[in-house]
Image (spheres, rainbow, N blue to C red):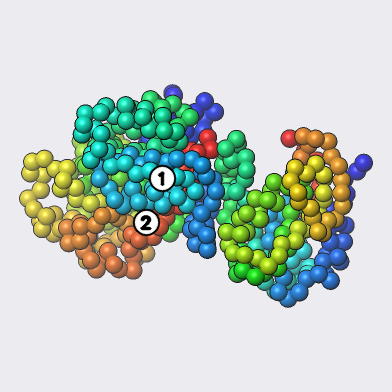
Amino acid sequence: MHNPQLNAKGELAHLLTLEGLPREIIVNILDTATSFVGVTEREVKKVPLLRGKSVFNLFFENSTRTRTTFEIAAKRLSADVINLNINTSATQKGERLLDTVDNLSAMHADMFVVRHAQSGAAHMIARHVGPERHVINAGDGRHAHPTQGLLDAYTIRHYKHDFGGLSVAIVGDILHSRVARSLIHVLNILGTPDVRVIGPQTLMPAGVESLGVRVCHDMRQGLAGVDVVVMLRLQSERMRGPLLPSAQEFFKYYGLTPDKLAAAKPDAIVMHPGPMNRGIEIDSAVADGPRSVILPQVTFGIAVRMAVMSILGGS
Amino acid sequence: MPLPDAEALCAELVKELRSVVTPETAMVGIHTGGAWLAERLHRELGLKLPLGRLDISFYRDDYHKSGLHKSVKASQIPFEVDGRRILLVDDVLYTGRTVRAAMNELFDYGRPESIALVALVDRGERQLPICAQYCGATHAVPKGAMLRLHRDDRGKLALRLDDA
């Protein structure tokens, strides 16, 4: 089967989704990221790999944090970075998405980092530009957020070393979460035996079991004996119609408190992709507690994005 | 002509370097063969500062042609580079491009007082103005062949000629 992310030599040319990626490509990204962690701790936090290359951040949907980490990653690889917040720009004047891309390609863009509210937007751009220019999906609709999935996998590997015996629980708004989808795919590819999703029925996508996960609606049952707890942000802005009685009600049943976390293994780590809603999906005592690795996730995210960009840029 | 004996060259380098090193001397080996040689020299010379290791993959000048190497190792420079006299160690000196990349990387850690190059073998065919201050032997090999250092399970070093 042809994978639109790979070039004729089987190398990664675009990063659009983790679904269906060969295991060795994922492991190579994580290994390369380990070397970049060292770079970001040096006096000079830059390497010259992408010197003279231009990286365009195309954000059709707002995200200061993700855009910033991509920007830092590209700058640490010595690329020139151009940020475009398109919702405030030409598309409002009616320009077609691919016309925007053609214009930027004519300005000699080498890499596009794309975030879009529509699933499949990054795929469409990748098909359009071909394998010489590289496209990284920085989140498309509910579909995928591959670099977030990779940085989550990197974080889990950093603290737990091996996926072979792990139980991982992903909690909350699974329905709207591209983070959850990308994480489930990468955990499966890396051979995690036990992946659970926990949340109310109204926030569970239909047929989620087919992704190879176990569904739980009770938090304490779901967290029993897990090594890793991944909390998701409640995406109120994507909710149309009443999916939840109230945020307080949600916190009562699914908010991660020290009390509920006690069901997990004593050395379980707590992750969150950010931005956090304190008091809605996570209690401050947990978010700021000793088992939280939420801030290291951000730091690793830069190294992982440097790894992805440097592998794509050399393909 | 048979390949030089790596163990004998190594012993000669130790003898030569003994009068050069001071308690302040730092040593950095280039992955992979250079790091093996550096481990040996570092131990035999009894250097006090911990050994540094460089993987120059992020600094290679052929990245845009050949892409990023698979299985990049993390570089480790476990000492302050500023003002330090550094012995940079590689197994085989050839075009000089690896050494240039290694120097570029070292300068991203700080400004050393000096860098001197130690090589087990110089195979000639330089493409850059770089030479080794301490060199075990010169030995020409056919263009396109790969002269590389190998290390066996017991740590014995040997040079080998591989087809590219």
What is the three-letter code of the residue carrying label 2?
A: Val
Of B117 and A220, which appears nearest the observer? B117
At label 1, counting other C-alpha atoms closer than 10 Å, the crowd grade (few under 14, some 14-19, many 20 or more) is some
Of A305 and A262, which appears nearest the observer? A305
Against B148, residue B23 (above or below) is: below
Q: CA distance from mark 2 to mark 1?
A: 20 Å
- In the image, taking residue A73 as reference, residue A212 lies left or right, namely left
- In the image, taking residue A118 as reference, residue B147 lies left or right, namely right
Q: Whole-percent x and y of residue A7?
A: 49, 28
- Is residue B131 visible from the viewing direction of this image? yes
Give the mark, 2 or 1, whose residue is nearer the N terminus: 1
| Displayed quadrant of residue A125 | top left
Of labels 2 and 1, the one closer to you? 1
Q: Which mark is residue A72?
A: none
Instruction: Give the chain of mark 1.
Output: A
Q: Whole-percent x and y of residue B32?
A: 68, 51
The residue located at (75%, 61%) in the rendering is: B116
- In the image, taking residue A187 as reference, residue B94 lies left or right, namely right
| Displayed quadrant of residue A289 | bottom left
At label 2, counting other C-alpha atoms closer than 10 Å, the crowd grade (few under 14, some 14-19, many 20 or more) is many
Against A10, residue A239 (above or below) is: below
> Badge 1 is on which residue?
A81
Q: Whole-percent x and y of residue A230?
A: 30, 53
Q: Quadrant of the N terminus of chain A?
A: top left
> Badge 2 is on which residue?
A298
What is the three-letter code of the residue carrying label 1?
A: Val
Of A183 and A90, which appears nearest the observer? A90
The residue located at (65%, 65%) in the rendering is: B112
* Number of residue marks: 2
- Is residue A209 visible from the viewing direction of this image? no
| Displayed quadrant of residue B14 | bottom right
Does dot 1 land on a helix, a strand or a loop? strand
